[in-house]
Amino acid sequence: MRVLVTGGAGYIGSVSVEALLAAGHDAIVLDDLSTGRRAAVPAGARLRVASYGDEALVGGLLESERVDAILHCGARSLVGESVRDPARYYRDNVAGGINLLEAARRAGVTRLVFSSSAAVYGTPDRSPIPEDSDPHPINPYGETKRAFESALAWYGAAYGLRSVALRYFNAAGASDRYGEDHDPETHLIPTVLLAALGRIELTVFGDDYPTPDGTGVRDYIHVEDLAQAHLLALQATAPDDLRTGAAEGPAISLVCNLGGGEGFSVREVLDAAERVVGRKIDHRTGPRRPGDPAVLVASSERARSVLGWKPGKGTLEEMIGSAWAWRQHHPDGYPA
Ligand code: UFG
């Protein structure tokens, strides 16, 4: 299968491209490198530096390269930035995404897997969260992910697009070669590890949540398990896939959570990281970060039963251990 991967120079995109190549598929990375890193594109994948929102360019690429399916990982993805500058999120995540869908429609590409997010749930009323919980995003980032999911369903019904939207919970860890390198870094695990190296100061955002130790609880899932879910989801979009319908059957617009199903608090992450690095990690406790729910834990039963997904990349300590190994090899992140 030949797959166009938008955002394939980003954290989750690069590990997914690596998994696609390892499984014998062909990958073309489309990334404007605004947040992606050239060095994160695996050897063996071709990189085209451009925006997925450039409909004419993408249409030409899909046709000339005879692309079978699209893995749409590219997006703006910072919750805080989305609150300050919602226009950027609507323009890139929604308008740009629709341009991508239009390019696919014109080129006759009918298979797409989308990187969605637990952010679509907002503050959930149930835990673990099943996919049929009502989505109530509480920031523009989550709203724009939700809007694009809806577009996929309507494109499926009207034009036969076969899609799977994967709602990631907290991606963590690294493969041997590819890891998490954001600027600025806002995610907990890389921030904790950078603090362990004395590069930045760590603040625990709030210890007065209604959780056992008062800090926020999240469902961490190894990025290589996410990458395997992408492979399974891409296969599930094939018209003759037995899991999602017989040949010539109706289009699917499947939505699946991807998480480990177990919650860990910020303090538990910090304790595990201290065991991994073998020393205490300095930190202070500050106020809550606006927009952070107390607990986000997924039910990933659907991904297991429909896609046959079996996450197995390990414990919290193993995830942090792989991130730490990557960070030690790349103390300054990817080269510019
Ligand atoms: N946290 C800290 N200090 C930090 C960073 C994070 O205490 O320096 C805490 C947060 O308050 C939260 C937990 O660590 O309780 C995890 O925070 P992350 O920033 O690592 O991840 P989020 O859960 O906020 O974000 C993730 C995805 C987003 C997605 C969101 C859904 O990274 O893309 O889940 O709410 F939108």
Image (tube, grey):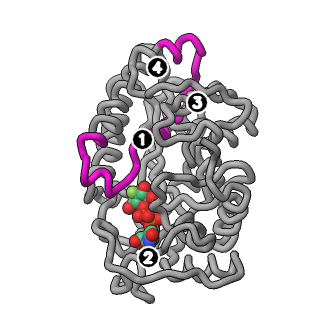
Amino acid type, callout 3:
Val
Q: Residue at x 48, y 28 (%)?
A: 249
Which tag, 1 or 3, sits closer to the chain's start? 3
Q: Which mark is residue 58?
A: 4
Q: Which residues are magenta?
A: 60-89
State which mark lies toward you, 3 or 2: 2
Distance Cα–Cα, label 3 vs label 2: 35 Å
Which tag, 2 or 4, sits closer to the chain's start? 4
Q: Which residue is mark 2?
A: 203
Which tag, 4 or 3, sits closer to the chain's start? 3
Residue 186, position in %: x, y? 45, 61
Distance Cα–Cα, label 4 vs label 1: 16 Å
Q: Residue at x 39, y 19 (%)?
A: 55
Amino acid type, callout 2:
Thr
Which tag, 4 or 1, sits closer to the chain's start? 4
Q: Residue 234: which quarter of the image?
A: top right
Amino acid type, callout 1:
Ala
Q: Which residue is mark 1?
A: 75
Q: Are marks 4 and 1 in contact (CB under 8 Å)?
A: no
Residue 78, position in %: x, y? 38, 53
Q: Are marks 3 and 2 in contact (CB under 8 Å)?
A: no
| Viewer-proximal residue among 63 and 336 | 336
Q: Which type of secondary structure does the marked residue at label 4 adopt?
A: helix
Q: Which residue is mark 3?
A: 29
Q: Is mark 2 within 8 Å of ligand 1?
A: yes
Quadrant hosting ligand 1: bottom left
